[in-house]
Image: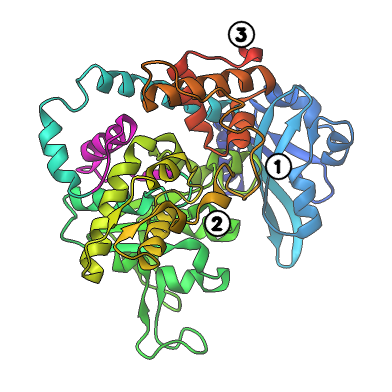
Amino acid sequence: MGAYIEDLILQTIIDTAHDHFFIVEASGRIRDVSPGAAAVYGMSREALCQTTVQRLEAEGVLRPSVTMEVFRTGQAAQLVQQTSTGRTVIAQAHPVFDGDRLVAVVSRSMDLTDLQLLQQEYALLQQRFSDHVKLGHGLGQDAEDLEAALGDLEAHSPVMREIASLLCRVASTDATVLMQGESGVGKTVFARLLHRWSPRAEGPFIDVNCAAIPESLFESEMFGYRQGAFSGAAPGGRVGLIEQAAGGTLFLDEIGELPLSVQTKLLKAIQDGSITRLGDTESRRVDFRLVVATNQDLAQSVELGQFRLDLYYRLNVIPVTLPPLRERREEVPALVERQLGRLNQRYGRDKILDRDVWQVLMGHDWPGNVRELENVLERAWLSSDDVIHARTLNVESQRNTADGGVPKQADMGSVGASLAEHEGLKEALARTEYRILAELCQQLPSTYAIAERLGISQPSVVRKLKQHGLEIRGNR
C-alpha cells in the first residue's frame, strides 16, 4: 500500500471520528484536527492548524494541554480539560516515536456531555423500573421464585428486592455488571448470587481483590505465565486468574483501585476476549462473565482523569448501586437474628438478646454496614453470658459518625426525630430524612455535594430526592 493511500485512510479516520482528534508535531505545531473539534474548542479547524498547543494552553483555549503532558513525561496521559467554550472534556494522548525520538503526539478528547447524558438516561430507566416494581409488576408471579432464590439472604427493603429482581433477570445474560456501594454493603454476596442464578453456576467463581495485587505483579497474576518467563517463575508456569474463570464468573472487587497502566491491559483483555500468558506467543480465547465492584464513584474518577473512559463504558453495562445499611434500617432486625443464629450454631450455645439492645442497633449509623454489624454482634456474643445486653455492643462511641469517624454536626434532636402521635419508626425516619434533604437542597449546589455531606453515594441522593419530590435550589 502506497504512502498516498495510507494518507487517505488516515484522513478519512480523522474526518469521520466521533472523538475529537489532534495530531501534533514534536515542536507543538498542530498538524491536523478532526472537524468536530471546532465546536468544543471554539476555533475553526483552519485556525487550530495554524497555531501550537503551547499557545492554546497559554490562551486558555484548553486547560491543561494533554499533549504538553506527553511532552513533559514521554508517556501516554489522560486528564480532564476545561475549554474556553465552557465545556469539560476527557482527553487522552499517546506519543509517537521514531526509535528513541519523539516525533508526534496523537490525542483524542470526548465531551463529557455524552457521559452525563448516559447517566441521565440510566437514572430515568432506573426510576421507571422502580415505579414498575412499586405498582406490583416488578416481581409479580415471580415473587415466590425470587424468595426461594434469595435463600437466607436478608433482603426485606423495597430497594434491595428491586436490586435482587433486576439481577435475577439479567443473570441469564453475559452482560457485565458494575456493583457500586460502600464497603460492607454486600457487593460480593450479590455477585455470588448472580453467579448462582446464571447458566454458569456450575463453573468457577473467581473472586479477585484488585487492590491487593501489586501493579508489578498484575499482569502475571491475571494473565498467567509460561515456565521461565521471568526470574522466580514457578516451574511449569501458571494459569492466570482470567483463565481460571473460564466457563464461570470473574469478580473483580475494588476495580477503582487499579492504576491507569493496569486498566489499559485489562481493557484489552475484555475487548479481545483473549489473553496471552507472559513469555508466550499463543493467544488464548477465554469465555467468562465479568462482574466488577467498587466503593468509588467511577464516573467522578473518569472526570478527574483517574479512570479510563473507554474502560468505564465497557464496565458500566448493568450498573447496580447497593445502598448503605443506614438507608435500609428495616433490614437490621432480620440481619441481627440471622447473625445471632449463626453464632449460636457455631459455638453451640443458645444466647438471646436483651430488649435494650434494639435502641442501640437501630440508632447506630453502621458506617461499616453489614460487615460491621456482624462483627459487633460477634464481639458482644463472645463477651456476654446467656443474655446479650446493650453495654456489650460497644458502638456508642461510633454512633452518629461518618465513614471517616468524624462526628456529624447534626444529632437526632436537631432534625426533629422525635416520634409524633400515632407515628411508627418507618414514618419518623422518612420524615427526618425529608427534613435533612430539604435543608441540604437549600444549602448545597449539587447532588455530589449532598452525597459527600451525608456520606452516601450520589445515585442514592438522586433516588432519594426523586422519592421525596425535592430539587436542589439551583435546578428550580
Residue numbers of the magenta segment? 153-180
- Label 2 residue SS: helix
User: In this figure, which residue is indicated by the disc labeled 3?
Assistant: 476
Compare marks 2 and 1 and give the one earlier in the sequence.
Answer: 1
Q: Give, as a three-letter code, the residue at label 2.
A: Glu
The residue shown at (46%, 55%) is 391
Residue 179 part of the magenta segment? yes
Camera-side residue of 175 and 451: 451
Tell me the quadrant of the picture where the C terminus can be found.
Answer: top right
Neighbour class for label 2 at 10 Å: few (<14), some, many (≥20)? some
Image location (x, y in percent) of residue 80: 69, 39
Compare marks 3 and 1 and give the one earlier in the sequence.
Answer: 1
Is any part of residue 246 visible from this angle? Answer: no
Q: Give, as a three-letter code, the residue at label 3.
A: Arg
The residue shown at (41%, 47%) is 185
The residue shown at (30%, 30%) is 158
Compare marks 3 and 2 and give the one earlier in the sequence.
Answer: 2
Which callout, 3 or 1, points to the residue nearer the camera? 3
- Label 3 residue SS: loop
Name of the residue lying farthest toward the top:
476
Q: Give, as a three-letter code, the residue at label 1.
A: Ile
Relative vertical location of residue 193 with respect to residue 299 in this rendering, above or below? below
Is any part of residue 381 visible from this angle? Answer: yes
**Colouring:** rainbow
User: In this figure, which residue is indicated by the disc labeled 1?
Assistant: 23
Q: Please indicate whether residue 387 sits to the left or right of residue 471 in the image.
A: left
- Label 1 residue SS: strand
Determine the CA span between mark 3 and mark 1.
43 Å
The residue shown at (62%, 36%) is 452
User: In this figure, which residue is indicated by the disc labeled 2?
Assistant: 257
Residues at circles 3 and 1 in contact by the CB criterion of under 8 Å: no
